[in-house]
Image (cartoon, coloured by chain):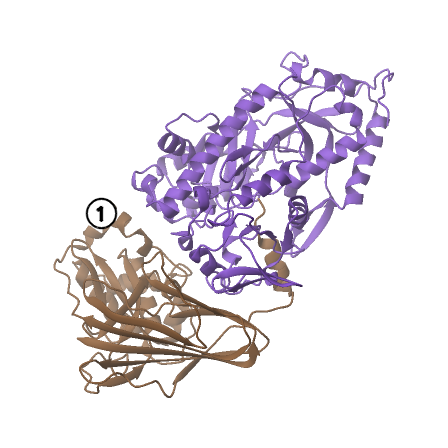
Chain colours: A purple, B brown
Amino acid sequence: MGAPLHNPGGGLLDRYAPVDAYDEAFDADGSVRATYSRIVERFRELDVDEIKRLEALVADEFRRQGITFTVYSEEEGTERIWPMDLFPRLIAAAEWEELARGLSQRVAALNCFLADLYNGGAAAVADGVVPRWLAMSSRGFERNAIGIAVPHSAHCNVAGIDVVRAADGRYRVLEDNLRSPSGISYVIENRAAMAKACSWLFYDHAVQPTEQYGRMLRSTLESMAPAGEHDPHIVVLTPGIFNSAYFEHAFLARSMGVELVEGRDLVVDDHKVYTRTIEGLVKVDVIYRRIDDDFLDPVAFRPDSTLGVPGLLSALRAGTVTVCNALGNGVVDDKAVYPYVPEMIRYYLGAEPIIDNVTTYMMWDPDQRREALARLHELVAKPVGESGGYGVLIGPHATEQELDAARARIEAEPRNWIVQELVQLSTLPSVAEDRLEPRHLDLRPFVLTGERTEVFAGGLTRVAMRPGSLIVNSSQGGGSKDTWVLAPDTP
Amino acid sequence: MRLSIAYRMYFRYSEPVTESQNEVRVRPRDDDHQRVLSYRLTSQPPLPVLSVVDYWGTVVEHLGIRTSHAELELLAEATVETTARPEPTESPPVSALNDAGFRLEHLEFLGPSQHVDWRSGDAVEQRAGAAVAAVASVPEMVSAVVADTREALSYEQGATDIGVSLADLLEGGAGVCQDFAHLALGMLRSVGVPARYISGYLFAADETSAHAETADVVAVQTHAWIEVAVPGSGWWALDPTNGGPVGERHVVIGCGRDYGDVPPVRGAFMGSGTAEVDAEVLIGRQTETHPAEASAPRRASPGRRMPTTPSSSERYQHQQQQQQ
């Protein structure tokens, strides 16, 4: 399809009015930021009919490829076409480089902590970097992980670190996802759909590619093979077709060129894991699992689990297989442990954090609790054990009754809550009815760690679809944007 | 006392099963009051055994079988030299339990756990509170709770299943050794005493009596009791099932927050039938003869069947997996 070079301009951005937040594309005076100058120019040339036509093309593409996601309601899941906004997010090379360094640093410290906690005698816990009782009382603290060998001490092989840009223009980490972060398949599919429907948008930008992710993940997982395995056999372990991220599990297996298996396809014999194939049993060396710890092995964990592999823990203990991500990472996904990550960076790496946390109040601390609950109407309350935006209360958007109910829940179980300062997430022009309007967004970059650490260029930009909404999770009705990390030679 | 222990586990399936995986925690531990002179675990058919020490310091042995079988027999044989376990040397006041350092040190054994959860109502806490209302020292407090546990429960096999809540246990008023232990642990923790579950063997004709046994060999089951942390004097072992001291006749396998951390056997199998696990412990003084082979297993507990086809509960589990 040709570029609409001679379009006189559809006025899509004529009345663009940034809200009270950092806008990624326009500065406070309403001038276009340098990084976005060409893309804004392109969008100024479009009119609403053209936008609608492109949106239909993208939706068709997703529908044809079967790219959907599932919103759970009651027991049944509802499938929806993956929502992608046409206006991309751009990140300049220098800015990305700084962000990537911060992400590597953070994941390195988290990996040091996990290695210390499970295999190193818990020095940080003993030294009080993280209070011992807090780590021990975390639902994600997995006592069965103690002593299981983890190659390169890389407990977290795939991390999804959610970052936001606050009103002051600086990035901050909102939460860490070190168990089964999902979304990378959508990053790659967004790019594919964008390149197909709007190829002309890419003409005057040098954008870092996305399709190398499968290769990166594969080489990370290969480096995690038990010692002595030079050509390791890797599988992706999925809970099955009813899981919301099943599409992604299949996608990753395909892009790495490895098998997608369910628990019933694997079997343990003599403390080794095998996959059943038509040629008989073939030993498995690395399992990229997208199943929670509790379900991995019905012998050692939940006896009612039908998803896992009986005896898997014995193979882990024998050191004949590696499970990625490692057992027990949930302890650092516990939002009550999150406030200690900057201190972990100082303790293990001897460095100051490159990316700060959002200011967080620990509800188990009586003083912090008293102050935070008094100001709850201007803060955000989050349960420590959830992800996907479930259970989050945004003070300014809550009714008096909702605030009171939250206060009561927090007072009843203070260990299970944190309260954070409200971050006015940055905005970007996004397609509304007949024009582009600012919508809030975040970014989930992916950090891969095996023998080496690599940060995937880009990540999943999630965008709130409703004006003013700060909830970007796709499970809560959020959308996405193609995310362009520009090559170093572009300004 | 030198004791010989033979623990025989006999798995029988109604239909041949294609696979079974088990982990067993039956090896006596080495500590200041008992020494393991010999130990071996064998199976029929013979299987490779992986032996590791878990988080709680207990030896876990993993055995799996992947060929069709209708029966599986495991035999753990140990010789252990035991000495009496001491009474507390100090008698600290109840207020000593509030010491922050002491509480932090015993964190794992202060809170509720899977089988020791008193929070569903206030019955356990109230009962414990009433039992210790008049005590001054920690040992008195512990003795009062153990005595009250024996008031609350009568010994009755088959009255409960593993997984019974403390509230239901109090309501039912009857149970076996692990129920006595769990209730005592719940009452003790609810009043701030760090307390842990002990799995082991008892050389006595039955677990309700700790009195001297004149027979050379007894056929029993595994036993359970508790240990409490007394400020300034370490762990103190008590047996709520029989109320007696924990002495040379008690052999410790390991400890945990409750039964769930140290079950003698846990497993899963693949197949369409049902499973029975018969288990029997023969214990004898070694000065005489070796214990005879277990002949007539006395109690059977049901095994577990692993579903092999998708079910609605499986669909629910697919969805439960946190994809962040």
Q: Is residue A439 left or right of residue A364?
A: right
Residue A117 or residue A391, whichever sits in front: A117
- Please state the horizontal and vertical placement of residue B245, each as a whole percent of the image: 19, 72
Give the residue type that dot 1 points to.
Asp
Binning the other alpha carbons within 10 Å of mark 1 as few (below 14), some (14 to 19) or many (20 upward) gives few
Looking at the rendering, in which quadrant would you find the N terminus of chain A?
top right
Q: Is residue A369 left or right of residue B80?
A: right
Measured along the vertical axis of the image, is residue A1 above or below residue B101?
Answer: above
Looking at the rendering, in which quadrant would you find the C terminus of chain A?
top right
The residue depicted at 44 percent of the width and 71 percent of the height is B47
Is residue A33 visible in this depiction of the protein? Answer: no
Which corner quadrant of the image does residue B241 belong to?
A: bottom left
- Please state the horizontal and vertical placement of residue A399, each as a whole percent of the image: 57, 38
Q: To which residue does mark 1 refer?
A: B99
Which corner quadrant of the image does residue A213 belong to?
A: top right
Q: Is residue B172 left or right of residue A476?
A: left
Measured along the vertical axis of the image, is residue B136 above or below residue A57?
Answer: below
Residue B87 or residue A14, whichever sits in front: B87
Residue B229 or residue B80, whichever sits in front: B80
Name the element at disc 1: loop
| Count of marks placed on residues | 1
Chain of the residue that carries numbered disc 1 in the rendered image: B
- Please state the horizontal and vertical placement of residue A269, each as a whole percent of the image: 51, 65
The residue depicted at 24 percent of the width and 61 percent of the height is B228
